[in-house]
Image (cartoon, rainbow, N blue to C red):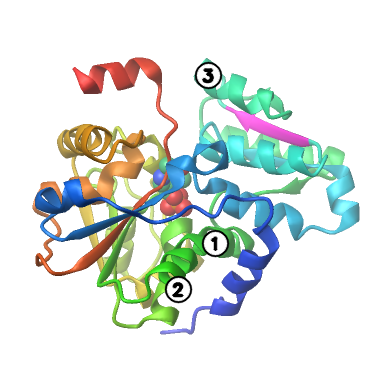
Amino acid sequence: MEQESSMTFDDILKASEKILVNVKRTQLIRAEKLDDLVGAIVYLKPENLQLTGSFKIRGATNCILSLSEEQQSKGVVAASSGNHAQAVAYAAGAKGIKATIVMPVDAPKVKVDNTMAYGAEVVKCGYTGIERDEKVEELIRINGFSLVHSHADPKIIAGQGTVGYEIMSDMPDLDAVVLPCGAGGLIAGSSLAIKHMNIKTKVIGVEPENIPRYRKSLEAGKAITVEMGQTLADGLRVNNAKDLNLQIIREYVDELVGVSDEYILKAMKEIIMKAKLLVEPSATVGIAAVMEGNIKFSPKEKVCFVLSGGNVDEEFLLKVLK
Ligand SMILES: *Cc1c(COP(=O)(O)O)cnc(C)c1O
């Protein structure tokens, strides 16, 4: 049943050209102060410094710019309470396209405010993903909106894959790249790009230990849904795997490990204090997994960690630092 993945490196190259002027080209940072902690030569890809504070602007922009003029004129819709919401709002707003974002009724006020500040309309609906998906379907039916999916769309995966493409363009001889794995868009696109550019570079993914959807899916040989467990990494709070993402992950990701909340907190503090970068919990999982002993490197290896975002609640940040 092994099938070739239906996406290619060319999709990522095209995305990279398409989003060039709308997205920041973040520069790799050499983080000497983290070498001892990690036990390797550490580089960081600081997507916390990206527009809207996370890499999600890449996929959203690629998806929106790929729509026809007619589709763009009708507007776009997305279901998200997190970084994807802000990314779609921003990417649409930058092109003068109407965006409607469906959020749960209990979405944090700061996220609703940020999304609206980028010019999107926020529609609140229910508490579950199922309720939000139904609302999205209805808005598409009534208004002819185009859906900007957060992770299971080739245009989104190609956009997120520009993270891996840029890393390897800047440092083609990296020994390993470590990425967070939520719904799997970032790691699918990036692993495809990384392996194409250097087959010897190891790609390692990290998901919350309590929500092992892709590890279980790899074991099962098909995309499955696991019970929703607790994690502080809100960007990784997804309990179902997707076929396309799984297919790419199976082909290009060397290792997938778990991480606990205890180490996410420890890593967040270390990254803030030693690398001087503000990161959100989801962005810390690679370094957290090393601190927890779930990934091991040798001191001469050059390793890049993707700091996927920096949108952290003020009160939470204060608690972490105490
Ligand atoms: C969405 C997100 C992730 C996970 O990306 P996926 O494509 O869903 O795997 C990781 N970190 C941050 C900050 C995110 O917003």
Q: Give the amino acid type for the residue marked by disc 1 in the picture.
A: Ile
Label 1, residues with CA under 10 Å away: few <14, some 14-19, many ≥20 = many
Sequence-first disc among 2 and 1 = 1
Note whether residue 119 is visible.
yes
- Residue situated in front as seen by the camera: 276 or 306: 276
**What residue would you read off at disc 3?**
110
Sequence-first disc among 1 and 3 = 3
In the displayed structure, 319 sits above or below 115; it is above
Q: Which residues are magenta?
A: 99-103
Badge 2 vs badge 1, beta-carbon distance below 8 Å: yes
**What residue would you read off at disc 1?**
157
> For the point 25% across and 35% down, which residue is it?
268
| Quarter where residue 2 is shown | bottom left
> Quick one: SS at disc 2?
helix
Q: Is residue 116 left or right of residue 311?
A: right
Q: CA distance from mark 2 to mark 1?
A: 10 Å
> Quick one: SS at disc 3?
helix
In the displayed structure, 119 sits above or below 18; it is above
| Quarter where residue 272 is shown | top left
> For the point 59% across and 33% down, which residue is it?
131
Q: Is mark 1 within 8 Å of ligand 1?
A: no
**What residue would you read off at disc 2?**
192
> For the point 10% across and 57% down, which residue is it?
39
* Location of residue 98 in the rendering, given as x and y in whole percent from the top left corner: 81, 37
Q: CA distance from mark 3 to mark 2?
A: 34 Å
> For the point 85% across and 39% down, which residue is it?
143
* Location of residue 58 in the rendering, given as x and y in whole percent from the top left corner: 58, 53
Note whether residue 247 is visible.
no
Q: CA distance from mark 1 to mark 3?
A: 27 Å
| Magenta span includes 289 | no
